Amino acid sequence: MSKLAVILRKEFRQIIRNPAIIRLIFVMPIIQLLVLPNAADYEIKHINLQVTDHDHSALSRRLIDNISATGYFQVVGYGTNSKKAMAAVEMDQADLILEIPHHFEKDLIREESARLMIAVNAINGVKANLGGAYLNTLIRQFNGDIRTEWIRPERLMQPYAIKTTHTNWFNPEMNYKYFMVPGILVLLLTMVGMNLTAINIVREKEIGTIEQINVSPIKKHHFILGKLIPFWVLGLVVLTIAFGIARLAYGIIPLGTYGAIYVFAAIYLLVILGMGLLVSTFSATQQQAMLVSFFIMMIFILMSGLYTSIDSMPEWAKWITRVNPVTYFIEVMRRVVLKGAVLADVTRELIIITCYAVLINTLAIISYKKRS
Amino acid sequence: MRQFYNFVIKEFIHILRDRRTLFILIGMPMVQILIFGFALTNEVKNSKFAVIDRAQDERSRQLIAQLDASRYFELTAQYPSIESLEGAFRKGQVRLGLVIPEAFGKEMERPGGTALQLIADASDPNVANTLVNYANAVVLDFERNVSGEKKIPYTIQTETRMLYNPQLKGAYNFVPGVMAMVLLLVCTMMTALTVVREKELGTMEIMLVSPIRPLKIIMAKAVPYLLLSILNIASILLLSVFVLDVPIRGSLPLLFAESILFILVALSLGLLISSSTASQQSAMFISLIGMFLPTVMLSGFMFPIENMPLPMRVVSNAVPAKWFYNIVRSVMIKGVGLQHIWKETLVLLGMFGFFMTMAIKKFKVRLV
C-alpha cells in the first residue's frame, strides 16, 4: 500500500507542478460548456422561403400572408421567375420554394381542387423534413379555413375528422438545453479523461523516465493505479465544477439524485481512463497515442445518440452504440436529470459499465510490460 | 531551396518509417467516412412508439398499422394504462405514445369527429418535435384514406420535391461534414505535435543553431502532411462516390483546390499552436479538446447555423470547418461553381494568411 502512496504522491505532484495543463483542463471545458449548448437548437424558425407566384390572385397573397404571419418562415424572395427561385436555393439564400401555379384561385373555385408545389433543399435533413412538414401543415390549415368560409353549412359537418393534441413529457417547456448541457458535459469529461491518460504513459516512454519505473520494485497494478487515481480525482472535480455551471448558468438541477450521477460517473471514469492507459501502453509515441484516441473518441462521440438518433441507425451501427460507454452515460444523464431516475433505475447501465471497467483495466494492467 | 527540399525528404522518411502512424493516418479517415456515412443521419426514423388502444376496433388497428408501416415509426408495445406507459418512457424504451380513445371508430363516422392524444418524450426536444409532426402527418393521411372516395370540396393538394437529395440520405450532409472535421483536426494536430515534439525532446536547440533558417525547417515538417492529406482527400472522395453513392456534381479540380486550401489553413493553424505551446500535451489539448466539439457543433452539419442565436452565429464564423463544409456541400452536392463560393474561399485564404503570419511572428529563434 505504501508503494502505491509513493507513486500517487509522485503523480499528483507531476500534475500540480504543470500549471499550464491544469489551466487547460479546467478552462477549456468550462468555456465550451458555457458556449456550445446555445448552438444546439433544432427548433424550426428562420426558415427562408422563396415564393414563386404565377397566380397573383387575392388567394395566393392571402396564403403567403398566412405563412409569413406564423413567424417560422421568412419570405426572402417573391417573384414569378422559377429560375431565380432555384438560384436563391443554390446561393443558400432560401431553404424552401413555394410555387403557386397559374390559375390557382380559379382552379380551386371551379374545379374544387388546386395544386401547390413545394421544393425543399434536402441536403440538411433537419430543415428539409421539418420545414417541408411544417409548410404542409400550414397549407392544410389554410385549406381548412378556406373551406369553412366557402362551403354551405350543411356540407361543412364532415365526418372522418381526427383532431390530435400532444403533450410533452419530462420537458414541457421544450428546453433543449436540459438535454444538451448534461450531454456536452459527458463528452467533455470523456475527452479530457481519455486524452490525459492516453499520452501519459507514452510520454514517460518518450522522455525515457519509464526506464526508472521499470527497474523499481513497483508492481504493475500499482503503476496503473497510480496513473488512474489522480486523473480519476481530477475528473470528479471537473464534473462537480461542470454541474455547478449547469446550475448557475442554465438552471439545471437533476430531478433525480446527484448520488446516482456520481456513482455512475465514478465507474464510468475508470472505463475512460483505463481506455486511455490501454492506448498509451500500445503506443510508441505521443503522436500515435493521440491519433488513436482521437479516432476512438470521434466514433464514441458521434455515435453516442446525443447528436443523431440511435433509432435511425442501421442495425450494425446500433451495435457500435452498444459497446460505446458514452451512450450509456448520456442515457443515464438524461434519465436522472430529466426523468428523475434514482440509482435503482439505472441498475442495468451500472452493471454494464462496471463489467466494462473491470475488463478494460485488467487489459491495461496485462498489456503494460516492464521490459522495453 | 535545396536545403529545404532535403529537409522535406528527411521528414518524409520519418513518417514513412513509422508504419503504425502512417497506417492510422491513411486508414482512419477511410474508416470514419464509411461508418459515419452509413450510420449518421439527421433524419429521425424507426422511432419506437407505443399505444394505449382503448377502442380496440377495426379503425384503431388500421391507424396503428399505418403508423407502424411508415418509415418514421416502429411499434414496440401496447400498454393498458398511462402508468405503465410512463414506466416505458422512463426507461427510454419509447419515444412517442399514442392514446386512442374509446369508440374511436364510431366517433370517426360521426360529424364532429374524434380526438387522439400524442405523448412525446421531450427529454430530447428536437426529436420530440419532429415525431409529433410526423405522427400528425400520418394521422392526416389516415384520415384521407378512410374518407376515401368521398370527395372533400376545395382541396389544395401539395406536391413536395426534395432537391439535391431525393432519398434524404444522411451521407449527403455528413460526408462534407466529416471530411471537414477529419482533415482539420488531423492536420492541425499532427503539425502541432511534430514541431512541439522537437522542443520536448531537445532537438529544437540543434535546429536553431543550424545554418538553415529554422522557419524553413518547420515549414518542411508541414509539407509531408500536406501530401498525405491530399491522399486522404482522394480516398475519401473515392469512397463517397463509389461506396456511399454521394455524387460529385461540380468540378473535381475545384473541389481538390479548395480542399488543399483548407488543409493549408489547418497546417498553418497547427504551426501557430506549436509555436505558442511548450509541450505535446498542451498542443494536443488545444488542437483536439479545444477544437473538436466547436467543430462538430458550429460548422453547420449537425445544427443549422441560421437557427442559432446571433452571438453563436457570429462565433461560428471563426470555425474554419464551417466555411469548408459550405464549399464541399456546394461543389459536391449542388454542383455550383466558384462564383457561388468565392466568399467562403476568400475567408479561408484570409484565415490561412492570418494563421501563417501569427505563427511566424510568434516563432521564437531563442530558447528562452
Image (cartoon, coloured by chain):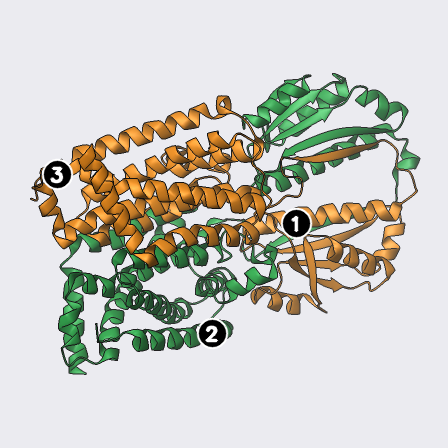
* Image quadrant in which you'd find residue B140: top right
The residue that appears at 46% across and 76% down in the rendered structure is A351
Quarter of the rendering occupied by the C terminus of chain A: bottom left
Disc 2 crowd rating (10 Å Cα; few below 14, some 14-19, many 20+) is: some
Residue B293 screen position, x and y as percent? 39, 48
| Mark linked to residue B30 | none
Look at mark 2 in the image and give the residue it sits on: A352
Is B65 on the left-hand or right-hand side of A326? right
Disc 1 versus disc 2: nearer the observer: 2
Q: Is A81 or B153 nearer to us in this picture?
A: A81
Q: Chain drawn orange, letter? A: B
Disc 1 crowd rating (10 Å Cα; few below 14, some 14-19, many 20+) is: many
Look at mark 1 in the image and give the residue it sits on: B132
Quarter of the rendering occupied by the N terminus of chain A: bottom left
- Could you tell me which secondary element the residue under label 1 belongs to? helix
Is A211 on the left-hand or right-hand side of A315? left
- Could you tell me which secondary element the residue under label 3 belongs to? loop
Residue A177 screen position, x and y as percent? 46, 49
Q: For the residues marked 1 and 3, what is the alpha-carbon distance in whole angstroms? A: 59 Å
A217 in relation to A178, above or below: below
The residue that appears at 14% across and 69% down in the rendered structure is A10
Give the drawing colour for chain A.
green
Can residue A38 be seen here? The reply is no
Disc 1 versus disc 3: nearer the observer: 3
Disc 3 versus disc 2: nearer the observer: 3
Look at mark 3 in the image and give the residue it sits on: B364
The amino acid type of the residue labelled 2 equals Ile
Q: Mark 1 lies on which chain?
A: B
The amino acid type of the residue labelled 1 equals Val
Residue B110 screen position, x and y as percent? 89, 49
- Could you tell me which secondary element the residue under label 2 belongs to? helix
Q: Mark 2 lies on which chain?
A: A
